[in-house]
Amino acid sequence: MVIMKIPTISFKTLLLALLLAGISATASAYSFTVDGIYYNISSSTDKTVSVTYKNSNIWSGEYRDTVIIPETVTYNDITYTVVRVGYAAFNTCKYLKAVHIPSTVTSIDEMGLASCPELTSVNIPEGVTRIGKSAFAGLPKLEGDMVLPSTLTTIGESAFNNCSGFTHVNIPASVTSIGDGAFGGCTGITSWTVDAGNPVYDSRDGCNAIIHTATNTLVIGCKNTYIPYSVTSIANSAFSGLTGLVNVNIPNSVTSIGSRAFYNCTDLTSVTIPDGITIINKYTFERCENLINVNIPNTVKIIDAQAFRMCSSLQSIMIPASVDSIGREAYAYCPKLESISVASGNPVFDSRDNCNAIIKTANRELILGCKNTVIPNTIRTIGDYAFEGCSEATTITIPNSVVHICQCAFADCYALTSIDIPNSVRWIEYYAFGNCTSATSLNIPNSVYIVGNYTFQGLKSLTSVVLPNSINTIPNGLFQGCEELVSIQLPEVVHAIGDGAFDDCKKLQEIELPNTVKEIGDFAFAGCWDLNGITIPDSVKVIPEGTFTRTGLTYVVFGKSMESIGRWAFLSSYPTSVTCRGTTPPVMATNFETSVYNNAVLTIPGGTRDAYMATNYWYNFQNIKEVYTDIPGDSNGNGTVDIGDVSYMIDYLLGEDLGFFNTEGCDLNGNGIIDIGDVSRLIDMLLDAQ
């Protein structure tokens, strides 16, 4: 699942991160420096040192051009022997071109020379016994034959990952341990050999691979590998990241294929999985984007999580009767899938009614669908990730039998044009319809009581939505990134609006917060550039951090119960009218932009000017208007009732942006709303007073 669902970072968290970054940028990570090389003392007794980086930040990349490490170095009249290239010593040195390592060095530690994109020359001298995890990872400009010393015993996990320029590697007789993915992504390697006499590994029969002799496990292969019939297992990541690998013939002797064995083999078009395999492990064929069809033998019992995820050319699936477990996202993001079937006799799964889906028989849960799926009307649950990444599906009909739609069930179905949820559904989980970017309509029935966080995030074509009265909480990020959403109607029962609920709804023009709302989350309306105005009901006491940052607000009205307005709640928003109905000024952190303080009109209850001018940040307002809202008919709050109030009330009914309106004092006919009857009653009051 590719998802962008990250909660908004709080200002406090960001400030702390910046503070820590500043601390790390100045803290020393070395014992001393000589001739531009930084050293840590490994042993004062043995007088040994390791090469290290300058600061505590391992990404600083201090070294450049050519670095020649000496065998010995003298500091404070003591001569030390250089024995290690230490942890991350040359990590991310983007201008480093060459490194000479002396014969005194015995270990190149984790990330010692990793991610140096311009490095073209480095030697691994005789005497080195250990190469640590990711020590040489990400060095694309190292080319030709890899020369490893005869003293080497250990090659760590991902040690040479993504060193794509090497063409041949010979493993010395001394090597007894090779970590997972040690040569992953070394796409240029065309041949492997192992020295005769190696007690642990061999490259039998000219197979162009490294095989663990005792277990007959193929540890590392290349695009020219031939898998001998004596091999019984393929190790984790054995072929991971190889380009140019088009076909793989796995002999029947193989009974185990490890996790990520063929991960990201983007040129792989066909593979034969032999009888005898019982588990297709996690990520085994993930991102094999040209793999069209895979025959799964009747011996397989488990297809683990993400086994075929992002196989974007895969067209058909046949689940044999032997399979009793399918992990989550096993076939997610396979948009070309058009045929899914389960063999008859499978005790756990079925594909009833030729539905082109996989269904858990016992609980009637659909766990995998495709663009041609017809959901049977016997299904109760749409499972986790069931249609995730079905980017070519334009229409999916959910039957009235479904009561539960699980997390990410329809996530990233980019071509889906409408979302029609039947009135049988009670519960929709996290990100269930996230990033369905083409959906222009959304129907949520009154049957839905629970909606998860980010359920409709990223519906970029949705223009309007009406939420049912059954939903009393707007979860975090519910409509985040719905860029075309213009209007939304909240039910009168809503009591909480979650963090980022409407974040980045750029075209949202209006939203009426019902009087039932008590809580509004951080950044709930951030990035609503077209939002014209907002009236916070009396039920809300706190506006948290960043709530209305980056909006188009022209007016803001705070209810009578407002107690606190969080930091940067209105950052990069420029209202011209700010109304606060409370007689006690709310506590306010740094909030409005300077231009707002200088130009906006602050409207406050009559007689409260001194209190506001004595309160932090409120005293910055230069234009202050006091209103007296206890006078019936005083619609503009200027303390008197005259013909101006009639005009003001008519403007209000016509939808003009007035900022302030004396709602409580202008319901003159007592029917609970402001209407033309109140205008008539106000005119009568003025005539009677003459």
Image (tube, rainbow, N blue to C red):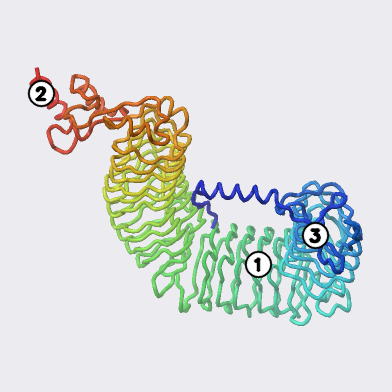
Indicate the quadrant where residue 121 lies.
Answer: bottom right
Q: Nearer the viewer, mark 2 or mark 3?
A: 3
Q: Is residue 126 left or right of residue 343?
A: right
**Residue 684 - label:** 2
Q: Is residue 550 left or right of residue 136?
A: left
The earlier-in-sequence mark between 3 and 1 is 3
- Which callout, 2 or 3, points at the residue further toward the start of the chain? 3
**Cα gap from disc 3 to disc 1, whole angstroms:** 37 Å
Q: How far apart are marks 2 and 3 (CA)?
A: 91 Å
Name the residue at 85% across, 72% down: 194
**For the residue marked with disc 1, what is the amino acid?**
Arg
Locate residue 556, reporting x and y percent: 36, 34
Q: Are marks 3 and 1 in contact (CB under 8 Å)?
A: no
Residue 516 point in image, percent of width and height: 27, 48
Q: Can residue 75 be seen in this view?
A: no
- Which residue type does callout 2 highlight? Asp
* In-image side of 41 versus 344 (left or right): right
Task: Report which residue position mark 1 lands on.
Answer: 260
Q: In which quarter of the image is residue 592?
A: top left
Q: Which of 510 and 203 is in front in this view?
A: 510
- How many marks the image carries: the answer is 3
Q: Residues within 10 Å of mark 1 (few under 14, many from 20)?
A: many
Q: What number is the disc on residue 40?
A: 3
